[in-house]
Image: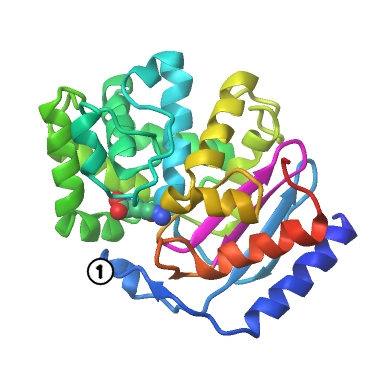
Amino acid sequence: MNQHYQNIIQGIFLQIKNEENPGEVASYIPELANIDADQFAVSIKPINEDAHSYGNHQTRFSIQSISKVLLLCLVYKHTGEKIWERVDVEPSGNPFNSLVQLESDNGIPRNPFLNAGAIVVSDMLIDLLEDPKKEFLEFIRDITDSETICYSENVAKSELKIGYRNAALCNFIKSFGNIKNNPDKVLELYSLICSVEMSTVELCNAFTFLANGGKKVSDGKVILTKSQTKRVNAIMQTCGFYDESGEFSFRVGLPGKSGVGGGIVALLPGRYVIAVWSPKLNPKGNSYRGMKFLELFTTATEESIF
Ligand code: DON
């Protein structure tokens, strides 16, 4: 492992661990509130090298919206460019669960990482695959090289119980004709996809192909073409943090994605994937320590995509 990265990561990890940890754990999904809020983990995986980690890096957590990137990759792989007829690639400048732009945009979500966008992509997955629940899991197990990654049925059920906003989004989009299946079926699959649990090491492994031109490092399998990989990374850069995407790009300078479970994954194409997990979120729904860690990391390494 590159000693330079290792020293920098250790220093930043210890510094942040000793500082105040403000923010709130996501509690709108009741099951997510039952977590030890002070857990903190970081893993970095340079391409072609094993991951190096600190803190609770073996603990799996709810990756939530980070899963939307993997969902997009699977559907994009099957449909090619047709996917963009049903979901756009513009930053929304609005919160992840916002409804407002759908009316003037005729039910076409601004991007696939908003709840609205990922709900449409989930609907597409139902029409593409015979058993989407099983095949999505097989896909993420394949790209992660881990046979034990699973959904959390408890988290998915807990989200569905209070999912009035997502139900509103799905029904509203259906009224424009951009949802083809039964909304209950779409929402069930969407919540399950968000409920996937991974550790920071597994998250790094899952995203390595996106730092490697679309190819898995372990067996060279092509997951996406180079052009598709560029596009997914570009959407992470511009839309990965909702109405804080500009701020993340400004402070960190890497494509990345956050989830309300407190995870953030980011990558430097051709170099590495880095994942941070700390459950307390800032007011925009992104991990407080995760944002801070990555800002300090790219500042110290003086490397970013810019
Ligand atoms: O639909 C939801 O609200 C969650 N399943 C996912 C939201 C999320 O992770 C937003 N991320 N920062």
Asked if one can make out residue 278 in the rendered structure from this viewpoint, the answer is: yes
Q: Tell me the residue at 89%/60% (across/down).
A: 3
* Residue numbers of the magenta segment: 261-277
In this rendering, the answer to whether 206 lies above or below 82 is below
Q: Secondary structure at mark 1?
A: helix
Q: x, y (%) of residue 38? A: 51, 80
* Towards the viewer: 151 or 283: 283
* Towards the viewer: 267 or 300: 300
Please state if 216 lies on the left or on the right of 29 as rendered.
Answer: right
Q: Is label 1's Cβ within 8 Å of ligand 1?
A: no
* Towards the viewer: 248 or 263: 248
Residue behind mark 1: 30
Q: Tell me the residue at 17%/59% (across/down).
A: 162
Please state if 10 lies on the left or on the right of 89 as rendered.
Answer: right
Please state if 155 lies on the left or on the right of 197 as rendered.
Answer: left
Question: Which scheme is used to colour this image of the protein?
Answer: rainbow
Q: Mainly helix, strand or loop, the magenta region? A: strand
